[in-house]
Image: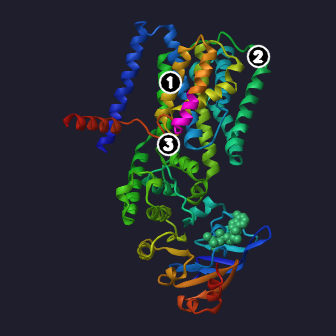
Amino acid sequence: MPPLLTANDVSKNFGGLNAIANVNIEVHPGEIVGLIGPNGAGKTTLFNLITGVYIPSGGQLKLHGEVEVDLAKASPHEIAGMGIARTFQNIRLFKEMTVLDNVMLAYHVHIDYSLWDAIFHTPSYIKSESELRRKAIELLDIFDMANKKDIPAKNLPYGQQRRLEIARALALQPKLLLLDEPAAGMNPQETADLMKLIMWIKDRFNLTILLIEHDMSVVMGICQRIYVLDYGKLIAEGTPEDIKSNPQVIKAYLGED
Amino acid sequence: MADKRRNLIRNIVTLAAIYAIIQLLISFDIIDQHLQLNLFLLCINIILAVSLNLITGFTGQFSLGHAGFMAIGAYVSAVMTLKLHLPFPLAIAASAVSAAIVGVLVGIPTLRLRGDYLAIATLGLSEIIRIIALNIDYIGGASGLADIPRYVNWPWIFAMTAGTIIIIYNFIHSSYGRACIAIREDDIAAESMGIDIAHYKILAFTIGAFFAGIAGSLYANYFYFLKPNAFGFMKSIDILVMVVFGGLGSITGSVVGAAALTLLSMVLQDLPTLRMILYALLLLVIMLYRPQGLLGNAELSWKLLKRGDKDAAATNSK
Ligand SMILES: Nc1ncnc2c1ncn2[C@@H]1O[C@H](COP(=O)(O)OP(=O)(O)O)[C@@H](O)[C@H]1O
Ligand SMILES: [Mg+2]
């Protein structure tokens, strides 16, 4: 099957620092691909390149949908509209908005009523909003949060904030979901539950997932393939078994701290 | 759904009642000329505060130039009615549209500037508007325009005030409004959710300016006189204080803020110095003890009232 996302010799420099250096990556439809590496390896930077927050210093980043798109030339909101959704390593919820509004906001690109409908609350607005609300609650239900829909997002406990961020990303109805350390700060039980949930939503919503994780053991169970970054360079690629026994990977992780 | 319908009927009945009662009080001269003037001023301030709240409270764009939009509306309306003898409905529509067009222009710097810088830029633009008005002889220069026909009566004021509140409330409670609030909350996350930030910031400025233009038109065609200096820096601050006092992000708050500060001005009309001191004190107290403003981001609603009833009933039954 042709890849959904390709990074071809991609680099990103910050001043003198090569945060990403000549990285090649392919993500195929339906895969869960892991992106691991020590702190500062460049994992988040790669997400920021894919989502258009940064422009690559070199190389090519392409999304292969119905048409091929050069991600370096698209702005973040356009890329989101093409079906790439993400979560953030440092949770970025709309804190003062309710849990439900956080999710409803993300349906924005699929809204079919006009500004006119909005300011006069026409039947088309009413119909569309109630449908949207139903969908958003359904989504929150999957994450066991429907009962918290009316509280401000900032009042959720930490673990649920992380889950809400994933729910919000799903509301965008993406093809490709980028998760940046979704289990950070969770205990082993919560982490295991979350990984199960990720597997489940992948099948339920027909997703392709690229998953960043700092802790290697977390992704071993659910990823089909794993890329390992260290100091901006790709040092290994392969199945979890390959990665586990790769001497370079072991060295990178042992050399940490 | 049935709930929504009931609330809609309640809202319509409440609005009709407010309209009718005040109309009656005016007819029987219980609301005399002096009171009426202040009532109209209050309504104009509500329009200004609610429309600024859309820009600053909901979308998070710190603007110090709202009086500039009002000035555009006021002068366009005055010129069209006084000099060109055009009908008022046409004048008020033109006022709103001209202010909105300037709103687009003011919105453009918001794409690059944030916070304090944006505040200074908007302040600068509104000062430019004032200074241009000062220097055009056709519109009276520094001495302004006089004998502007008075077309504004209670039905006009009421319709425009209610219309502003309803339209901005509806906007906020739609996908468009959620996008604006999301930008205020976290612009990077908003972009990653597919929101075109530039588009919505400009939209907020355009809509905000549109209604400030209406406020200006009402002002011009009620008060007979117009002077550039009525739309200076202090007027923008005045409007901002109403919004901050009531609560950034609450439309009810803006109405309450406008009411409180218009009342304060009315009571202290003859003591302008004391008024300024009280103003400053009031702001200080709010900043220290309730920085989110009187209402924070809460809105008055039927549900809230009902819950209040239930709470009261619960305490009574104990
Ligand atoms: N905007 C930026 N400006 C300068 N340096 C940056 C920026 N973003 C990331 N970096 C640097 O790039 C390197 C990779 O960071 P990051 O991608 O966040 O690592 P990871 O997510 O793998 O922990 C780090 O050394 C970091 O300090
Ligand atoms: Mg990171």
Give the distance between the C-alpha atoms of the residues marked 1 and 2, in whole angstroms. Answer: 31 Å
Report the amino acid beneath label 3.
Ile
| Image quarter (top left, top right, bottom left or bottom right) of the N terminus of chain B | top left
| Image quarter (top left, top right, bottom left or bottom right) of the C terminus of chain B | top left
Marks 2 and 3, the one that precedes in the sequence: 2
Report the amino acid beneath label 1.
Ala
**Local SS, label 3:** helix
- Residue under label 3, please give it: B172
Q: Position of residue B170 (x, y in %)?
A: 47, 40
Marks 1 and 3, the one that precedes in the sequence: 3
Q: On residue B142, which mark appears? A: 2
* Nearer mark to the viewer, of 1 and 3: 1
Please provide the residue range marked out in magenta: B282-292
Q: Position of residue A152 (x, y in %)?
A: 44, 51
Report the amino acid beneath label 2.
Ala
Residue at x 55% of width, y 25% of height: B45
Mark 2 belongs to which subunit? Answer: B
- Residue under label 1, please give it: B260
Mark 3 belongs to which subunit? Answer: B
Left or right position of B65 against B306: right
**Local SS, label 2:** helix
